[in-house]
Amino acid sequence: MTQNLHMDHLASWWTEARKHVPKPNRHGFDSLVVFICWQLWKERNDRTFDRQVRTINKVVDGVFDDISAWLLAGYRHLELVSLISVTVAGRDLMPV
């Protein structure tokens, strides 16, 4: 029951938040949310099953690594996200 409550909360937040993103940028926003969720899920599994803990900076690095890999593969919806990410985090991503 609690898991469904959290999933409903995330889904509600996501649905509402993406309304504030211009339509051409929503694919990139959705991808960013998925990358963040994926890294958090991996961190949870590492802590639960392998007793390994990463710092928040390492988790964020994982998100940037995902973005870089997708940009390298030609996924253009993340171009705007990558520009914002470089500005906010001061990190070099793969050039687009």
Image: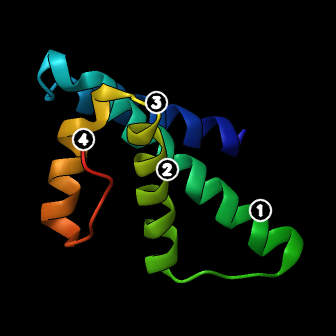
Lower sequence index among marks 3 and 4: 3
Mark number for residue 96?
4
Which residue lies at the image location 19% right of the left edge and 73% below the top edge?
90
Pointers 3 and 4 in contact (CB under 8 A)?
no
Decide which of 28, 43 is in the foreground and name it.
28
Q: Which of marks 2 and 3 is in front?
A: 2
Q: What amino acid is found at the position of numbered circle 3 in the picture?
A: Ala
Q: Residues within 10 Å of mark 3 (few under 14, many from 20)?
A: few
Q: How far apart are marks 4 and 2 (CA)?
A: 14 Å
Tag 1's secondary structure? helix
Residue ID for mark 1: 45
Tag 2's secondary structure? helix
Residue ID for mark 3: 11
Tag 4's secondary structure? loop
Mark number for residue 66?
2
Lower sequence index among marks 2 and 3: 3
Q: Residues within 10 Å of mark 1 (few under 14, many from 20)?
A: some
Vertical side of 78 occupied by 51: above or below: below
Q: Distance between the residues labelled 1 and 3?
A: 21 Å
Q: Distance between the residues labelled 2 and 3?
A: 22 Å
Decide which of 34, 92 is in the foreground and name it.
92
Q: What amino acid is found at the position of numbered circle 1 in the picture?
A: Asn
Which residue lies at the image location 48% right of the left edge and 46% below the top edge?
69
Lower sequence index among marks 1 and 2: 1
- Could you tell me residue 79's position as x and y percent? 23, 37
Q: How far apart are marks 1 and 2 (CA)?
A: 18 Å
- Could you tell me residue 82's position as x and y percent? 24, 48
Lower sequence index among marks 1 and 3: 3
Left or right: residue 41 compared with residue 77: right
